[in-house]
Image (tube, grey):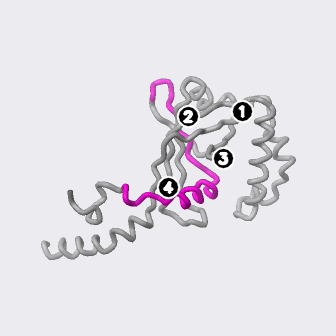
Amino acid sequence: MQDQTTNYDDVKQYRLDPEREQELVNTAGECVFIWANKSGHPIGVITAYVPVDGKIWMTATRERVRIKAIARDPRSSVVMSSKGTPMGGGKTVTYKGRTTIHDDPKTKNWFYDLLATGMAASGDDGNAFTANLDPDMFIRFLDTPERIVLEFTPEMSIPFDGDKMAQGTAAAYAQFAAEDSKGS
């Protein structure tokens, strides 16, 4: 097998360290939530989330197609990127797992409070909506009869650290480029 610093065939050595993965989960704030439609085709949306005890919590209204799809088949995925976070770009994690739909008032109120508090705390992120967010008003805004809460439980992860890859391959890439220019 060829030394992996000379190509990108196997990027397992560039895994995001567990503590950096947790930092990413705790700071990204948005993820791509992916499910399968009736024909089995994967599709996703970008959505806000709150991480709690190793799970990813999101909300939507009952009429969204993703809710019907998850009710049919709870298998789903979540993808997060460090782009736009204090971590800088180049770090990602993809989770495979299952999603549970909650519509009980206790879970909804618990989640709405977490989401509103988190969004209010991020009011300095330049977003006009969160800049003057009143958490109590936002909770009342969210609390509609059709709103539900999604609980995503990860079963497997694919963490990736682009910074590690860049550091690990810079010299090899320079050597490859030098050899390539000699052959031209």
Crowd tier of the residue under label 4, counting other residues whose Cα lies within 10 Å: few below 14, some 14–19, many 20 or above = many
Q: Which residues lie in the magenta part?
A: 12-40
Mark closer to the chain start, 1 or 4: 4
| Side of 151 relative to 18 (left or right) | right
Q: Residue at x 55, y 60 (%)?
A: 19
Quick check: marks 3 and 4 in contact, CB under 8 Å? no
The type of residue carrying mark 2 is Arg
Mark 4, residue position = 92
Residue 171 position within the rendered picture, expressed as x and y whole percent measured from the top left:
30, 74
Q: Nearer the viewer, residue 121 or 46?
A: 121
Dot 4: what SS? Answer: strand
Crowd tier of the residue under label 3, counting other residues whose Cα lies within 10 Å: few below 14, some 14–19, many 20 or above = few
Mark 1, residue position = 148
Q: CA distance from mark 2 to mark 4?
A: 19 Å
| Side of 157 relative to 173 (left or right) | right
Mark 3, residue position = 53
Does residue 44 appear anywhere in the picture? Answer: no
Q: CA distance from mark 2 to mark 3?
A: 15 Å
Residue 178 drawn above or below residue 125: below
| Side of 166 relative to 77 (left or right) | left
